[in-house]
Structures are given as structure tokens and as C-alpha cells.
Amino acid sequence: MKYLIASSILVIIVILCFLFYPFELFSHENISYDDEQKGLSEQITIRFSHVVAENTPKGLAAQKFAQLASEKTDGLVNVEVVPNGTLFTDEEELDALMKNDVQMIAPSVSKMTKLALEWGLFDLPFLFQTNEDVTAVFTSEIGQNFLKLHEDENIKGMALWSNGLKQMTSSVKALKKPEDFIGQRFRIMPSDIIAEQFRRLEAVPIPLPFDQVYVSLEANRFEGQENTISNIYSRRLYELQNYMTISNHGFLGYVVLMNKEFWNSLPKDVQTSLTEAMEEATTWMINESMKMNKQQLKVIDKDSSIQIHYLTNEEREAWLNKLMPVYQTLYNQVNEKFVKDFIEQRRKQLETQ
Ligand code: LMR
């Protein structure tokens, strides 16, 4: 009997222990974090996707921004830069940004023409002559107006970045006179204003995303293309082309964009730090892209068999005569007065040069 009572008491004790034991101490939610882990859970992560290589002006500027953003917020903001279009390609990134599938992108201004024709301004031939011209426009009211163009589409413009002036390449012949373009197919970025320029030269424009340029050139889907030296170099396009003309005929710029709702959700002090980080990265990039384009042209010249021709003033004049009507095309298409005024002003300058 004694034995029965003792074992019943034991069973009751075991049941009570089971019911009231603080098992939550062992649950995952309550594992205590050290300081570093706690910091991680509070971090603000911004994914910044772009389509070029890491060692290009845009790739490096994105990393510079990430570093400055982290420094200025004491590690609170973590900008994850994803290069080479591995997250989203040229064709996908704008939609992804609007849906907040990615928080930051930096498409070329030419690719922005699918949202607003006004961006075609930057595709006009011989719009800029020097990098100083670019800086003057980017830091003026015009630049600021461009940044505000897509606020209604949940897009905040953060900055305009410059990759410098574009050069022409071909596998068929040296591009000196307008006639040299006749019948050749050229890969272009998707922009009606760029396409019209090649049609005026009696060439065939082929719009194609950047990630497909090398393989398509290898497969002879076109004979030539235009780009900045840093893109020609980093994608090794010069290996597949026999001729390059340093023409400085066009411009390649980017607009750095952030999902607007995401931006609005950030604390004010974080917004201030990110604005400062972006200003510093922008200044850094202008100098860096100038340096890289110069240095890499030297390397291409030294290490490859591509023939390099520098467009003469006379040749430039002949290209300009063929291409000038494009100014009128864009003028007729756009609504924003600030863009129309700028087109008129630049057209007059070019006509009197
Ligand atoms: C291109 O498509 O050639 C460029 O826009 C790539 C880039 O982003 O520099």
C-alpha cells in the first residue's frame, strides 16, 4: 500500500513538473542574441541591382555608395549591390523597382525613354562635347527636373550619373564618313532617338539588352555597336571588333532610382545620410569614369589589334549634317518645356559652330 501511495505521488509530481516547466526558455524565439546579431535584425537592407560588371564606373560607384551609406549610418544601412544583371536584366529592372522587388537600380537614360520620351534628350547626337558639359547640365535645374519625372509612378530619382561619351566600333570597316555606315547592323540600347540616328546613316539599328551584346556579336547578329570605352573594355567587345572610331558622338548616362514608398518609409535621419552618400558617390563617379575611359582606351590600343581612328573635325561636321534632323524629331515628341528649351538652345549652338 505504502508503495502504491509513494508511486502515485511520484507520478503526480512528474505530471505537475511537465505541466508547469518553463519550456519557453528553450524555444527559438527566446534564444538570447549577442549585440552583433541584434544589430543585424535591425539593419535596413537595400538591394541595388545593375547590369554591368563590378569593375565599371557604374559598378564601382554603386559599391562606393554602399560603403558611404554604411559609414554614414554606423552600419544601420546595408546596401547589397548585385551586378551583371544577375538579379534583374535591363528589360526587367524597372518593373521590379516599381513593385519593390528591388529597392535601387541605375538604368541608362536611354532605357528610360520607355517611360518618358523626354529622356531621349540625352541620346541626341553631339549633345555634350566634354565631361564638364555633362556636369553642368546634371547639376542644373534641368537635372533636378529629370529626377522628379516619375514620382507618380512610385519612383524617386536619386542622382544622375555619367559614364562619359560613346564611341563606335565595327567588324567590317573603319567608320569615318557617313557612307561607311550604309547597310551595317548596329546593336543599340532601346531608344527611338538612337534608332533614328542609325537609320539616317542608312544603317540597321538592333535594340538589344546589354547582357546579350557579346554573344550576339560572336554569333554575327550585327556588325557594329556604340558604347563607352569602359563598357567596350569590360565586356571585351573590342576582341570581336576590328575598327573603333573615337567619335564622342553620343552620351551614356544613368539615373539612380529608388522605390519611392520604400524611400518614404525610411527615418528622416537615414534619408539625410543616404542623400549625402549619394552626392559623394556621384562626384566620385564623374572623375572615376573619366579616368577609366582614358586608361582603358590605352590598354585596348596596346593589347589588341583593333584599329583606332580619331574622328576629324571635318568628319564630325559630315556626321552632324546627317544627324541634325533628329533634334527636330525629339522636339516634336516631347511635352516638357525644360526639355524643349534645352533642345533649341543646343541646336542653335551646333548650327553656328
Ligand atoms: C548598354 O546597354 O550598353 C548600357 O546601358 C549598359 C550600362 O548600363 O552601362
Image (tube, rainbow, N blue to C red):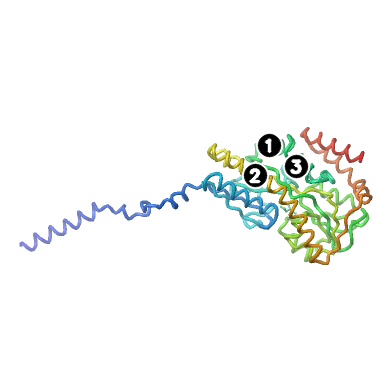
Report the number of discs.
3
Question: Which residue in the structure is indicated by mark 2?
Answer: 280
Question: Which residue in the structure is indicated by mark 1?
Answer: 148
Question: Which residue in the structure is indicated by mark 3?
Answer: 135
Q: CA distance from mark 3 to mark 1?
A: 18 Å
Question: Which residue is drawn at the image coordinates 29% and 54% (left, top)?
Answer: 23
- Neighbor class of circle 3 (other Cα within 10 Å; few <14, some 14-19, many 20+) is some
Depth order, front residue of 242/15 = 242
Residue 232: horizontal and vertical position, in percent?
77, 59
The quadrant in which the C terminus is found is top right
Using the image, determine if residue 312 lies above or below residue 135.
below
Residue 171: horizontal and vertical position, in percent?
85, 63
Between circles 1 and 2, the one closer to the viewer is: 2
Residue 116: horizontal and vertical position, in percent?
73, 41
Using the image, determine if residue 152 lies above or below residue 79.
above
What's the residue type where badge 3 is placed?
Answer: Thr
The quadrant in which the N terminus is found is bottom left
Residue 192: horizontal and vertical position, in percent?
80, 47
Q: Regarding mark 3 in the picture, which secondary structure is present there?
A: helix
- Please tell me the numbered disc located at residue 201: none
- Neighbor class of circle 2 (other Cα within 10 Å; few <14, some 14-19, many 20+) is some
Using the image, determine if residue 306 lies above or below residue 255.
below
- Neighbor class of circle 1 (other Cα within 10 Å; few <14, some 14-19, many 20+) is few
Mark 3 near mark 1, Cβ–Cβ under 8 Å?
Answer: no
What's the residue type where badge 1 is placed?
Answer: Lys
Depth order, front residue of 5/229 = 229
What's the residue type where badge 2 is placed?
Answer: Glu
Q: CA distance from mark 1 to mark 2?
A: 20 Å
